[in-house]
Image (cartoon, rainbow, N blue to C red):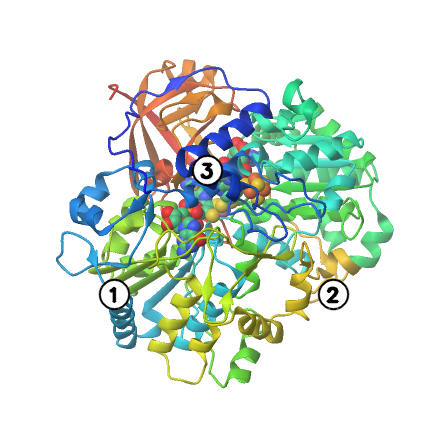
Amino acid sequence: MAKKPPVADPDERHPRVTEPMTAAAGVGGVTHGLQAGLAEMGVRRTALTLLKVNQADGFDCPGCAWPEPKKRAHAEFCENGAKAVAEEATLRRITPEFFAEYSVEQLAEKTDYWLGQQGRLTGPMVRRPGGTHYEPISWDDAYSLVAGKLRETRPDEALFYTSGRTSNEAAFLYQLFARAYGTNNLPDCSNMCHESSGTALNSTIGIGKGSVTLDDIHAAKLLVIVGQNPGTNHPRMLTALEKAKRAGAKIIAVNPLPEAGLLRFKNPQRVRGLLGSGTQLAHRFLQIRVGGDLALFQAIGSLLLKEAAIDQPFVDAYTSGFEAYEQARRHVDWRWTEQATGLTRAEIEATARDFAESDATIVCWAMGLTQGRDAVATIREVVNVQLLRGMIGRPGAGLCPVRGHSNVQGDRTMGIWHEPPSWVPALGDALGLPMPAERGFDTVEAIRAMRDGAAKVFFALGGNFAAASPDTAVTEAALASCELTVHVSTKLNRSHAVPGATSLILPCLGRTERDEQLTGDQFVTVEDSMSCVHSSRGRLEPASPELRSEIAIICDLAAEVLDDRLPWREWKTDYRLIRALIERHVPGFDDFEARVAEPGGFTLPHPPRDERRFATPSGKALFTVSAQASIEVPEGRLLLQSVRSHDQYNTTIYGLDDRYRGIKQGRRVIFVHPEDLAALGISDASYVDIVSESPDGERIARQFRVVAYPTARGCAATYFPEANVLVPLDATAKESNTPTSKQIVVRLEPCAAP
Ligand SMILES: Nc1nc2c(c(=O)[nH]1)N[C@H]1C(S)=C(S)[C@@H](COP(=O)(O)OP(=O)(O)OC[C@H]3O[C@@H](n4cnc5c(=O)[nH]c(N)nc54)[C@H](O)[C@@H]3O)O[C@H]1N2
Ligand SMILES: Nc1nc2c(c(=O)[nH]1)N[C@H]1C(S)=C(S)[C@@H](COP(=O)(O)OP(=O)(O)OC[C@H]3O[C@@H](n4cnc5c(=O)[nH]c(N)nc54)[C@H](O)[C@@H]3O)O[C@H]1N2
Ligand code: SF4
Ligand SMILES: [Mo]
């Protein structure tokens, strides 16, 4: 039954370019999603699987973290959800023969697309020191190998990475294992993603999560979507925006790129959407310069103060720091603001009026705000504006960081964090284990530690560390310098091709698959972007009888590494035992088992949203003051950001097209404004090397096809992860240490076509 993978390398050298689209989804969306399913899974499996996505008795979509509505449609998924499912539920298989055929060196030559297309991993594999190939290994031998190495390693020299698809149960046990072993070295994909949001929100409203529910989105009067491309990355958010729009909401898009989904939307689940020209979503498009948002929100704050358009009772009762903020925002330097934002004073004044006129405003944001140098300050300015207007703890209003990975928020709730959450010491006391107090390494620090020989073991629960992290050459060398690398994965990826001296691939079950343990079929739980916790149960026959659940892998390994104080082997037999443990130790999970059995699950407490209570030192929400700041781009240079195409999930490449932006059969493209191209003397459709300039030297990404594109002036865009070679390891956001993968100063050097 295993379908043959495409063996030939597709020719991606000469991407075809057409006009970008102006609307998202519609018929195209649905059929593209189904095509992906049919190609990978066949008819029966496609029908069986896609009908279970996001249903109360089904599995949580492995795509993004956007929440499901309480009342579910029959087809509660989008095109990209269908692609994510197809990628996992594919019938293609990677067998030991595959690894015998391709050496590690040959795998390293392949593209991310090719690696992903080979199918599901089916059995544990090891690459031994000096070996040229991965070879099969038994699970028991794999565990002994890892346990032996961990026992002879100092705990602070081991790293335990997590990607955000991991379930709550697996995440809780994983952090417990790492801490019981003796380290807080728990870097995660959040460090590269919404860490800036967490840092800004924790320090101002006392909790690092968004303050809105899906009902709030539907009830909002003004929705401001900043640095986010929902048409591609959170497609069903468009359905919610459309609903709000029909109820009279205004929508503002703040983005250097005119992203199709934000401007117009054809709802594939309504007949009108399938046929008609769709709903005009954004009534105002602010085509901001990359990094201009800090200046924008500072100016909006100033204008609201000047017009006295503030909710004084809210400010008086619930906030502190207002006087200093008011003082700092008294004047707007319009020349500077227009320069930094690329917007006109009139546009910004009109936007401030929209804020002033709305009594229910939500600001949504994603990577366009979090992955810049001043990301934390920028998000704090968003908070300032929302506090001025009293937009927290009010229906239809709030702060909405839209999370990426489907359980990245839950993983943090479960303690996946290099800074131990407040409940960890009590957990240690209760279990009779000392918990390490010292802060661990985040992602960037983890790379430095491997590079410098201060970390020797790298263990990854999911993800693709080599491709997702910045400074690819440095990161790959860092991984390769480890004594042991271990990847718990569903699919082959670049990280497997840059092994440490000894390297293991441990294949695990995915969301869509039945998880049977000693006490029967199990389900797991996840938390979406709006703090709703619900269950996820897979139904498909596992891709191989050798696959183990992430939970089983953690439990077996922990039982082998640690002494017998904790009942690891018992926990894996019945996931209810793990949920009982979570209920006892993680705040907000009272009556966990019963509440998660309710259709749709339950929503975790959020004190600012629920009762305007702020767990800050002063007990109030904090206004903060940030200095004016913008990125200096020298003459002849561009500010490059890296985005996702419509045909990828982070480092997993589903296909080589980016339909909405008019790109076909290739990914090495760079989008530049036609007038910037003219000024640089570079022609559309020519090829360039992209050179990033930083104090520690230059980095080059070769042979990108130039695409004249209506982005903001002075800016450029290209795709992640191809762009990661350009991001210096030391270029990170202040305070959150998130790689600045949306702000790379580059020059373009003409080169020959490939
Ligand atoms: N299909 C699909 N879905 C996904 C993912 C995927 O790869 N594929 N990834 C998931 C993950 S982990 C995440 S974190 C989310 C990411 O979701 P997004 O944040 O939407 O992803 P990006 O493609 O990085 O898009 C960032 C947007 O910010 C804009 N932008 C860049 N710089 C700036 C700036 O300085 N200011 C402003 N205002 N805008 C800016 C870009 O033009 C782009 O529209 O999506 C999740 N969902
Ligand atoms: N330049 C640039 N770099 C970026 C970004 C950017 O915008 N620009 N975005 C950043 C962001 S927001 C994020 S979140 C990170 C993403 O970083 P990661 O989360 O590390 O990367 P992914 O590509 O999501 O990981 C994909 C791999 O996860 C494995 N996998 C899939 N499903 C499962 C599962 O159920 N269990 C297990 N164990 N493994 C599974 C598969 O083997 C697959 O190859 O990248 C960051 N890097
Ligand atoms: S919006 Fe996100 S969670 Fe919902 S179906 Fe699409 S990819 Fe899946
Ligand atoms: Mo992310």
Which sits earlier in the primary sequence, circle 3 or circle 2? 2
Identify the residue at the far right of this view.
313
How far across and down, in percent of the image, does residue 269 sit?
A: 65, 31
For the residues marked 3 and 2, what is the alpha-carbon distance in whole angstroms?
35 Å
User: Taking 653 as reference, is 53 above or below it?
Assistant: below
**Amino acid type, mark 2:** Gly
- Compare residues 331 and 308 and report the one nearer the observer: 308
Residue 286, quarter of picture:
top right
Where disc 3 sits, the SS reads loop
Residue type beneath disc 1 = Ser
Is residue 53 left or right of 182 when viewed as pictured? right
Classify 10 Å Cα crowding around label 1: few (below 14), some (14-19), many (20 and above).
few
Circle number at residue 619: 2
Q: Quadrant of the C terminus?
A: top left
Amino acid type assigned to the residue bearing label 3 in the image:
Gln
Residue lying at 52% horizontally and 39% vertically, measured from the top left: 47
User: Badge 3 local density, few (<14 within 10 Å), some, or many (20+)?
Assistant: many
Q: Which residue is mark 1?
A: 138
Which tag is nearer the camera, tag 3 or tag 1? Answer: 1
Q: Is mark 3 within 8 Å of ligand 1?
A: yes
Q: Is residue 123 left or right of residue 41?
A: left
| Residue 664 showing in the rendered view | yes
**How busy is the neighbourhood of tag 2: few (under 14 within 10 Å), some, or many (20 plus)?**
some
Residue picked out by circle 3? 743
